[in-house]
Image: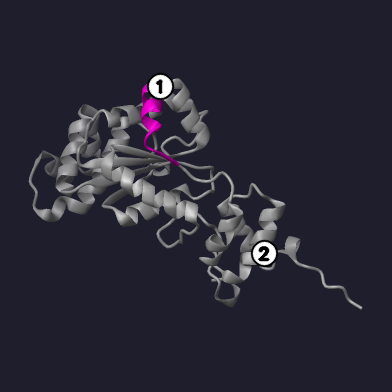
Amino acid sequence: MGVNGCTIPKWPVAGESYKLAGKSWLRAVETLVKLTSAFPMAILLGRAGMGKSQVAYEVCKRTNCIYVDLTEVGERTMPNVVAIVTWRLLSRYWDKGAKNRLVEVYRKFGYEGLLSLARGDPAWTLRSALELAGGRTTIVLDELLPSAEDPKFFEVAYILHRVRNMHLSNASFLVTMLPEVYEKIVERIPPLGNFFMHITVQLPDVIPEDEVEDIVSAYCTEKVELARKILAERPDITVRELLMELNNIPSRRYVELVPVD
């Protein structure tokens, strides 16, 4: 809690407890919900700190969703990605009485057993887990490729190619990425680039002036004017940086000096 009842997070990273506001961000959510209902994959682009993960969380609230933060995965390989998605699905659905090989491996050997299956046949492993979920599932892969300079860039990028070619009729993957990662994939992996053109949503590179009030009011109406001053001085500020500035109370850089007689 901040002063006067304001609830500006001290370290604004994405989470279910945080709020999403701004027309561009809410429009992105609506578009992504539609894309994930019709396509095997959707891509969300945005600069670091501009709200990609929070948009993904909001999509999860509106769909049957499994959210995977890939910073939790040691090595970004196809078996590891499939195993953690399968683990999350089974953790949620295995107790519904379903009996199959996947459930037995999960009960007896846990995550390591699922990882072994994923190494042998990732498509079968994922498909079997999705069958337990029943209806269509949105699978968020957040931070799959955190940098265009990653030494294993192409190895990780081809995970998306393989996932697309699994033809999973009851799942859609929502993948967040930085613009420079997207541009490298489009340039260097044409089959993915051509596919991405039809399924990509991009967040604003900068905060639109006419959306500052909506974004800041979600946390603290009293800070709207201060936010406008900050944006005027730093037009390229990210949403995260803006909220951090507003949480510095008082923000000495923007205090208006009152002349003293």
What is the quadrant of the N terminus in the image?
A: bottom right
Please say if 91 is above or below 141. below
Please say if 186 is above or below 202. above
- Pointer 1: what residue? 190
Q: Residue 100: where, in percent of width, then height?
A: 9, 42
Q: What kind of element bears circle 1?
A: helix
Q: Locate residue 115 relative to residue 191 in the image: left or right.
A: left
- Residue 226 has which mark? 2
Residue under the image location 51 percent in, 30 percent down: 148
Residue farthest to the front? Answer: 210
Q: What kind of element bears circle 2?
A: helix
Q: Locate residue 198 relative to residue 103 in the image: left or right.
A: right
Is residue 192 in the magenta section?
Answer: yes
Callout 2 environment at 10 Å: few (<14), some (14 to 19), or many (20+)?
some
Q: Residue 132: where, in percent of width, then height?
A: 15, 47
Callout 1 environment at 10 Å: few (<14), some (14 to 19), or many (20+)?
few
Residue 159: which quarter of the image? top left
Q: Is residue 152 visible?
A: no
Q: Locate residue 42 relative to residue 91 in the image: left or right.
A: right
What is the three-letter code of the residue carrying label 2?
Leu
Q: Residue 204: where, in percent of width, then height?
A: 53, 46
Q: Residue 43: where, in percent of width, then height?
A: 40, 39
Residue under the image location 72 percent in, 53 percent down: 233
What is the three-letter code of the residue carrying label 1?
Pro
Foreground residue among 118 and 7: 7
Is residue 33 in the magenta section?
Answer: no
Span colored in magenta: 190-201
Instruction: Report, in whole angstroms, how far the alpha carbon at label 1 lies from the one at label 2.
Output: 45 Å
